[in-house]
Amino acid sequence: SNTPNRIIMTVAQDFANHNGGQMRFGADGYLYLGLGDGGSGNDPCNRAQTLDPADIQTGGGCRGESSVALLGKMLRIDVDNATPPGANNVCAADGDGSAEYSVPSDNPFFEMNNRCGEVLHYGLRNPWRWSFDRNTGAMWIGDVRQNTWEEVDLLQAPADAAENFGW
């Protein structure tokens, strides 16, 4: 194929672990991405619960880019349509507000000024493996937890509303 590679999204990381990483397209044609909380232990930057990019914690290794508000989240984006320059709630947008993707209008935080539109669910530590059930469309999320426990979450309708997994 002669199709050039293109960078769709860049998300800053605070530390070297808990980067999540799995992504796949859903039956709705949108790209779903599971992002870890940005690393270290016990989510020291509180990324999993940061919904308002204005509340980003900095210092002690915690970075200040607006994209870190996407950490500890399940994202859902439209890679077939770009976001034009200007004001929006796309937290991984370029400096002029443009992005190589757009936010689906049925995402829970679509067009909310104090939220990242890309976010579908939040409160995750490191959802590095997850899948859609082939028969029901439900989403299964394997979330790496702290110390002794691992977590498997089942969402019957992944796009209905933002679910907080509590990390």
Image (cartoon, rainbow, N blue to C red):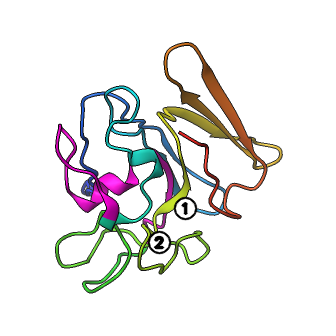
Circle 1 residue: 30
Location of residue 133 with respect to 120 vertically, above or below: above
Query: What span is colored magenta in the figure?
Result: 55-80
Residues at circles 1 and 2 in contact by the CB criterion of under 8 Å = no
The residue at the point 50 percent across, 15 percent down is: 147
Cα–Cα gap, marks 1 and 2: 9 Å
The answer to whether 129 appears left or right of 79 in the picture is right
From the top left corner, tell me how far across and down residue 73 is, in percent: 48, 49
- Asked whether residue 8 is in view, the answer is no
Which kind of residue does numbered mark 2 sit on? Val
Question: Mark 1 or mark 2, which has the lower sequence index?
Answer: 1
From the top left corner, tell me how far across and down residue 159 is, in percent: 66, 61
Q: Residues within 10 Å of mark 2 (few under 14, many from 20)?
A: many
The residue at the point 33 percent across, 38 percent down is: 38
- Asked whether residue 62 is in view, the answer is yes
The disc label shown at residue 150, or none: none
Work out whether residue 147 or residue 84 is closer to the camera in this orientation and state it. 147
The residue at the point 22 percent across, 43 percent down is: 62
The answer to whether 68 appears left or right of 25 in the picture is left
Q: Is label 1 in a helix, a strand or a loop? A: loop
| Residue 3 forms part of the magenta stretch | no
Circle 2 residue: 103
The residue at the point 20 percent across, 55 percent down is: 64
Residue furthest toward the top?
148
From the top left corner, tell me how far across and down residue 138 is, in percent: 75, 47
Q: Is label 2 in a helix, a strand or a loop? A: loop
Location of residue 43 with respect to 69 vertically, above or below: above
| Residue 76 forms part of the magenta stretch | yes
Location of residue 12 with respect to 89 vertically, above or below: above
Residue furthest toward the bottom?
86
